Image: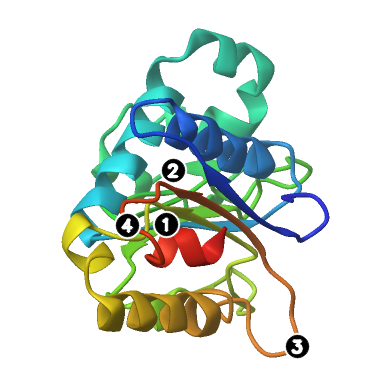
């Protein structure tokens, strides 16, 4: 789905590791250069930020990941988890524009590296989805080309047909439209059915 631009929904019981698998699939898609701008979308802003924090921890502490993608992760790992270090980071005299923010990180601009200009951000399903775009060092507007939807419903919303419909409309419209008009986007969605005909049930 990441490579060819497909939509994929994955249903497994809670606690079975589906989020772990899909979040790492999104990270792999960026590191391998298949996608440039990935967005984690969760049921709430808080859940989305928690997932992004998990990715950051993985980047800083996973030795195997570092061995496989040392160049791709170098700008981020050099910050050592301190966002203020990003301001002065340079490569061959040029600013990398690396970022390590609460809701977004940029892998930095380094010519010839697969992750040059890549971005990973997060937001809540009912939050500011339309604002997911950034301006590159050359002035080009970049929009998401990969979205990870993690359990897009809460137990409360799953029991409400109107909330299920609203969230479904947001997913089909705002979320899948983040790439811009007439542009395809890859989407991975993890979900668990709570009630019959809830949002997860409809997706599947």
Determine whether label 3 and label 4 are within 8 Å by CB: no
Instruction: Identify which residue is drawn at 65% across, 27% down.
Output: 71
Label 2 – label 1 distance at C-alpha: 20 Å
First in residue order: circle 4 vs circle 1: 1
Q: Is residue 83 above or below residue 36?
A: above
Measuring from the top left, give residue 148's x and y in whole percent: 51, 54
* Image depth: mark 4 or mark 2 in front: 4
Residue 89 picture quarter: top left
Measuring from the top left, give residue 39's x and y in whole percent: 48, 59
Which residue is identified by label 1? 121
Query: Does residue 85 appear in this view?
Result: no
Which residue is identified by label 3? 182
Which residue is identified by label 2? 89
Determine whether label 3 and label 1 are within 8 Å by CB: no
Residue nearer the viewer, 123 or 117: 123
Few, some or many residues within 10 Å of mark 1 (<14, 14–19, 20+): many
Residue 157 picture quarter: bottom left
Measuring from the top left, give residue 64's x and y in whole percent: 57, 10
Instruction: Identify which residue is drawn at 52% across, 85% down.
Output: 173
- Helix or strand or loop: what does disc 1 sit on? strand
Label 4 – label 1 distance at C-alpha: 30 Å
Task: Indicate which disc residue 179 carries.
Answer: none
First in residue order: circle 4 vs circle 2: 2
Few, some or many residues within 10 Å of mark 3 (<14, 14–19, 20+): few
Task: Indicate which disc residue 195 carries.
Answer: 4
């Amino acid at each position: 789905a990441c490579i060819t631009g497909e939509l994929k929904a994955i249903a497994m019981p809670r606690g079975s590791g589906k989020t772990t698998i899909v979040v790492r699939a999104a990270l792999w898609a960026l590191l391998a250069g298949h996608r440039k701008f990935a967005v984690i979308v969760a049921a709430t802003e808080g859940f989305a930020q928690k997932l992004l924090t998990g990715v950051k921890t993985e980047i800083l502490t996973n030795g195997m990941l570092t061995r496989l993608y040392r160049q791709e992760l170098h700008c981020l790992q050099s910050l050592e988890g301190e966002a203020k270090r990003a301001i002065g980071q340079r490569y061959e005299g040029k600013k990398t524009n690396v970022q390590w923010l609460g809701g977004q990180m940029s892998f930095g601009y380094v010519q010839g590296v697969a992750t040059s200009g890549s971005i990973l951000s997060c937001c809540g399903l009912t939050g500011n989805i339309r604002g997911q775009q950034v301006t590159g060092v050359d002035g080009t507007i970049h929009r998401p080309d990969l979205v990870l939807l993690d359990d897009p419903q809460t137990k409360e919303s799953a029991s409400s047909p109107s909330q299920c419909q609203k969230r479904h409309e947001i997913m089909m419209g705002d979320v899948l439209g983040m790439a811009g008009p007439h542009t395809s986007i890859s989407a991975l969605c993890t979900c668990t059915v709570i009630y019959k005909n809830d949002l997860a049930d409809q997706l599947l």
